[in-house]
Amino acid sequence: MLPLVRRAATLDSMDTTALIVIDVQRGFDVGAYWGVRNNSGCERNVGSLIETWRERGQPIVFVRHDSAEEGSPLRPGTTGNDFKDVVSGAPDLLVAKRVNSAFHGEPDLARWLREGGIGAILVCGIQTNMCCETTARVGANLGFSMSFALDATHTFDMRAHGGGTISADELTRVTATNLDPEFGRVVTTAEALASAEAQ
């Protein structure tokens, strides 16, 4: 049974944005498996967001990818499944998933947000163009006001369909273009922190 803390249910939805920290797990440090990554500042920015959200009493959701793929560094029971040190303290909700969207994990993230009267989410984590982007799209489609902290995400170079390689930086640029303004706002960590302080 995953831990579920109902503290967020008492928060005022007008002043509440849930921080969704996606898949910041040790398995993504296995460079031989994933390839070349971008944005070495991702983890530092994730840590700043967690620290500020906790100080401000805002809800925090940790999402963990429990891979079912043979040989994946993210498989349950391996050290790669564990969160990195920057993902510290207890979240208000822990979601485990086996697909790209945190809204298709357990427990039900959308239900928890709605029961808590939380209408806004801020997405960060790994990978920018995979689980982070998918979660952002699904969250927006479900009616949540979505912000995406682009510099608090990172991804890896990928083989392109039809040949060649697409760099992690280019994939990040495409994710930002896909999301803003169609699905919500793409922001920097500094902008997200300033917004939290203003509240």
Image (cartoon, grey):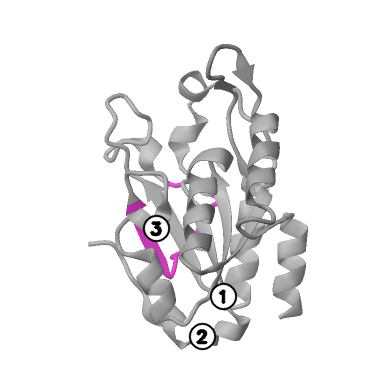
Residue that carries the numbered disc 1 in the rendered image: 58
Question: How far apart, in angstroms, are the residues tagged by discs 3 and 1?
Answer: 19 Å
Q: Which of the two marks, 3 or 1, is nearer to us in this view?
A: 3
Q: Magenta stretch?
A: 83-96
**Residue 94: x, y in percent?**
38, 61
Please indicate whether residue 26 sits to the left or right of residue 51 in the image: left
Q: Give the image quarter of residue 146.
A: bottom right
Q: Residues within 10 Å of mark 2 (few under 14, many from 20)?
A: some
Q: Are marks 3 and 1 in contact (CB under 8 Å)?
A: no
- Magenta segment main secondary structure: loop
- Dot 2 amino acid type: Leu
Residue that carries the numbered disc 2 in the rendered image: 11
Question: How far apart, in angstroms, are the residues tagged by discs 2 and 1?
Answer: 8 Å
Residue drawn at the location 36% of the way across and 72% of the way down: 111
Question: How far apart, in angstroms, are the residues tagged by discs 2 and 3?
Answer: 21 Å
**Residue 59: x, y in percent?**
51, 72
The image's mark for residue 103 is 3
Residue situated in front as seen by the camera: 77 or 14:
14
Judge whether residue 131 is colored magenta.
no
**Residue 136: x, y in percent?**
53, 55
Residue situated in front as seen by the camera: 28 or 107:
107
